[in-house]
Image (tube, helix red, strand yellow):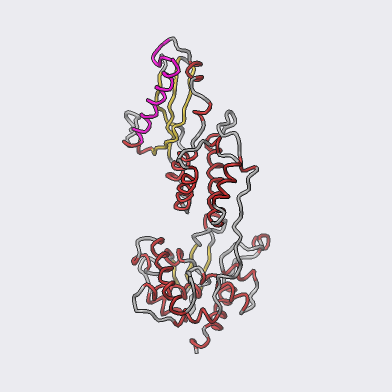
Amino acid sequence: MATITTEFGKLSSNKTRTVYLRIRNGKLEKRINTQIKVAESEISPRTKKIKNREKAMSVEIMRLEWEAKICMQGIGIFDAKVKAQRITSAISKKEEDVDFFAFAKNWLAHTSIKGKKNYQCMLNTFSSFLGKESLCFSDLTYTLLKAFENHLAKKPRAQSLYLGEIRHLFREAMLEYNTEEKTVIKSDPFIRFKVPKQVMKKGVRALTLQELMKVYHYQGRPGSRAQLARDTFILSFCLMGMNSVDLFSATNYKNGFIKYNRTKTKDRRSDEAYIEVKVHPFIKPLMKKYAGTKTVFNFCSRYNDYGGFNKNLNIGLKTVGKSVGINDLEFYQARHTFATLSRNLMKFSKGDVDEALNHVGSFEVADIYIAKDFSIINDNNFKLIKRVFKNELA
């Protein structure tokens, strides 16, 4: 007699199992990937059933839908004379196709990748463009991708980011479903389609020395958001362009050095983007003003998460910018200004500026042979601070 049962796949590296529906009659069977993943804790050790009510209901609904599909083909699911071949032939090629949005949602639910919010924004924009929230991978074609690219023509950053994310999800799905025995996702449109690169205008976001000093001399109401933004901007500049996320989360400040792994790139580099920044005496009053207990700075006690912290910094900087005559002042300009003045004012080498910014740089072979020495970039930073704030240090 033909039956449809639930079974669990092998334990994956992220400690989850994929739920399958198995259609079986005699010795022949067909397995259907539900795209639902469950943790070991969500499976009852006694009954082998899913304990998570929402996931259990989703699987049961799918099982009933497959029963209905087979019955609609004129096959009695409980008829012992039904051959398994008729059951499998009732499942069309189109039904086997994986849905892009369903896969993306499950992937996001289990991945530890940073930037989940960007992926969700992409899915929202893509579904709005399509007018629906379902799309078979076989329908994700070169023509569709070009149309979406044109749709985002006025948003170059989103154009590059979103299409790159779609490509990443497509490749993840190919790894998930394609095996040596079976190819579920057969055509890769990204062989032809090239994700556009975002063209950045170099240097335009950096402040001049005069503008930087205007920000430095800004005095807002004590404890205000604008004053916090100004102080943090100066901290970032004097700490070699330290990102706001790293200012928010840094925990290691000993013997005059802040030691941290740059959040943005630590997962993509063999050295985990490690850097040591020596704190100049010039900013020690700010270090004391914002000193934290468990973290270097107390920003995490002021804001629930980094997103709120960064948002408020940029809102505060709009107030600072309006006051000192700098339009659309943003926090990231502290990093651009540090890089620009290091090179153009102090004439430091591009290699040293790259290293100070904690970039990989272009000396990959040399980096294999040369032991890491942060004293060079820290000495340069001290010289920069002395030159920029010479009147304040006098």
Tell me which residue sits at (48%, 64%) in the image.
260
| Residue 76 magenta-highlighted | yes
Is 5 left or right of 336, judged from the image as shown? left
* Percent of width and height locating residue 184: 55, 31
| Residue 178 magenta-highlighted | no
Q: Is residue 227 above or below residue 250?
A: below
Q: Residue furthest top?
A: 81
Q: Is residue 104 above or below residue 29?
A: below
Q: Is residue 390 above or below residue 35?
A: below
Tell me which residue sits at (44%, 15%) in the image.
74
Is 309 left or right of 27, judged from the image as shown? left
Is 383 left or right of 56, judged from the image as shown? right
Towards the viewer: 148 or 55: 148
Q: Residue furthest bottom?
A: 394
Query: Picture quarter containing residue 153?
Result: bottom right
* Percent of width and height locating residue 133: 45, 41
* Percent of width and height locating residue 352: 62, 71
Query: Picture quarter containing residue 343?
Result: bottom right
Which residues, given as a range, are shown in magenta? 55-80
Q: Main secondary structure of the magenta part?
A: helix
Towards the viewer: 111 or 220: 220
Give the quadrant of the N terminus: top left
